[in-house]
Amino acid sequence: MRKEEDPKKPGAIRVENFNLYYGNFQALKQVNLEFQHREVTAIIGPSGCGKSTLLRSINRMNDYMDQVRTEGQIYHENRPVYGPGVDLVEHRKKVGMVFQRPNPFPLTVYENVIFGCRLHLELSRSELDSRVEKSLMSVGLWEVLADHLDQDALSLPNEQQQRLCIARLVAMNPDVLLMDEPCSALDPIATQRIEELIHELKKDYTIIIVTHNMAQAARVSDWTAYFYLGNLIEFGRTEKIFTRPEKKETEDYITGRFG
Amino acid sequence: MEVKFSRPAHHRWIEFAVEKAIFGAGIISIIFVALIFLFLLKEGLVLFRHYPFTNFFFGIQWSPISEPPRLGIVPLILGSLAVTLGAVVMAVPLGVCAAIYIAEIAPGWLKDILKGTVEFLAAIPSIVLGFIGLVTLVPMVKNIFHIPTGLTAFSGSIMLAFMAMPTIVSMMEDSLRAVPRAYREGALALGATRWQTIYRVLIPAASSGILAAVMLGIGRVIGETMAVMMITGNSARLPTTLLEPVRTMTATIAAEMGEAVQGSTHYSSLFAIGIVLFIITFLINLTASAFIKRRK
């Protein structure tokens, strides 16, 4: 009812004619895609379809791999992400990433949350304290960890580690959260709770989530993009993709006939 | 037709023999270490029958052939300490930087060349390094500081810093490389620069390996003999600055073992120095392996 019929409003992230090559292998082919503000977009597809590659391209995590070449452009709030004048540090402050396996730093809970703030901002102790409280609250960890801020983050259970990784992004007030299979290392109950958290976070952030779990895509997302062999096959409202997909390939994948 | 699953008897016999042979080889090395230590104790502890314990450990004069002999090892310990500390102060910062460069910054092809070269440094015999040091480093130190002789603790430190580098760089590089990629990506994704990633995440994460590398480097330095003997001037006096000749514990043993009469007080005092050295090195290695174990 809303964004789909409202082409004037530009998305938070816009991908235009984007190609990515690993050496001679083309991992993404002419991708055009727009991610809407404060909504969750799921990227689905079989392994090797380029879904993680696209996600990593959005905050340029592929820069550190050898022999990666890109063509086309990605825009964040109409500012190009690729090009000579791009301030990567500024970009990554606004577009944060959560990885497959929780990767808190081997530091205390407190230091993990304010890691980014310490890098980029000059904050007083009390400002830091309040950021820690606010961030942990927004990921539902404050009640559990308020008295354990000095605990080693690596000693937390997996689910809390993953929440902590989200908290350390939230602490920097980003616009966009990129999540690369954020539940793949978690058990079903923890997964459910992270999904609930994604619902909560949607109020404040644009979220793009890569998942190989179609049920998860159906549960958490407003939009779904289906990729196959580096091509964007279909993109649309999640309920539409999962009930009345336009393309035969999408239907085959979603119904489990293939993939 | 009947199928036989049991192996022929001679297979089992070979299995048994190999197992025992490997066990024997393993146990032999332990027995050797124990025997060496016992021999060292036996030859060294005799000293304290004729010579007071406190005079040995707290005496500040080492003149074994004076009458009566004075066998205070304080100058020797200080000599070893001065040379070792000097070497550590030089080798550690340099080693850390080299390791970081190799592990994190150098492009792939250069990495292999650099690491190979640093490790090759370990293959140079210490006597060769000592000789090169004697003809190049010693005159240089003499001229730069305008001192009567270049055979000083400082020259020894520089030489030993070189010798400790391969151990330090190679081990540190390994432990930096062992830091999970996820930490790196996590920091970069938070907008950290390469340098911020290195000093805020990688170094803390690799800290136990880095400390272990430093300890093993120290172990290498404190046990080194030939090069120090050639370069440090071998004067068993209490050093007051690094720009003076010193004599280390190792050099003392090497220099005097030939002339000490077997069974004499002098002879057993050299073994007693050996015990002290053994204990120091043992403690250093113990600390290093404690650091390594702490690493998850």
Image: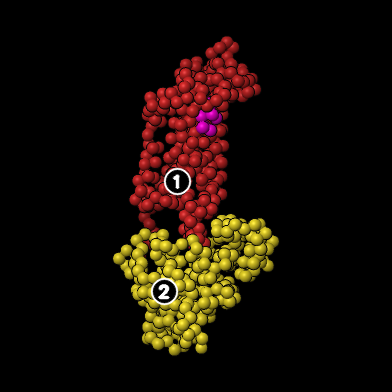
Chain colours: A yellow, B red
* Residue A242 shows in the view: no
Q: CA distance from mark 2 to mark 1?
A: 39 Å
Q: Is residue A50 left or right of residue A146?
A: left
Q: Amino acid at mark 2?
A: Val
Q: Secondary structure at mark 2?
A: strand
Q: Nearer the viewer, residue A156 or B276?
A: A156
Residue at left 55%, top 16%? B63
Mark 2 against mark 1, which lies toward the viewer?
2
Across and down, in percent, residue A146 comes to 68, 63
Q: Of all residues shown, which one is farthest toward the right?
A: A147
Q: Chain of mark 1?
A: B
Question: How would you classify the magenta stretch by its main secondary structure?
Answer: helix
Residue at left 42%, top 51%? B105
Which of the 4 image quadrants contains residue B71?
top right
Q: Which residue is mark 2?
A: A15
Q: Nearer the viewer, residue A102 or B42?
A: A102
Q: Is residue B68 left or right of residue B125?
A: right
Residue at left 41%, top 59%? A64
Q: Secondary structure at mark 1?
A: helix
Q: Does residue A65 lie above or below A258 as drawn? A: above
Q: Which residue is mark 1?
A: B99
Instruction: Magenta stretch: give its range.
Output: B79-86
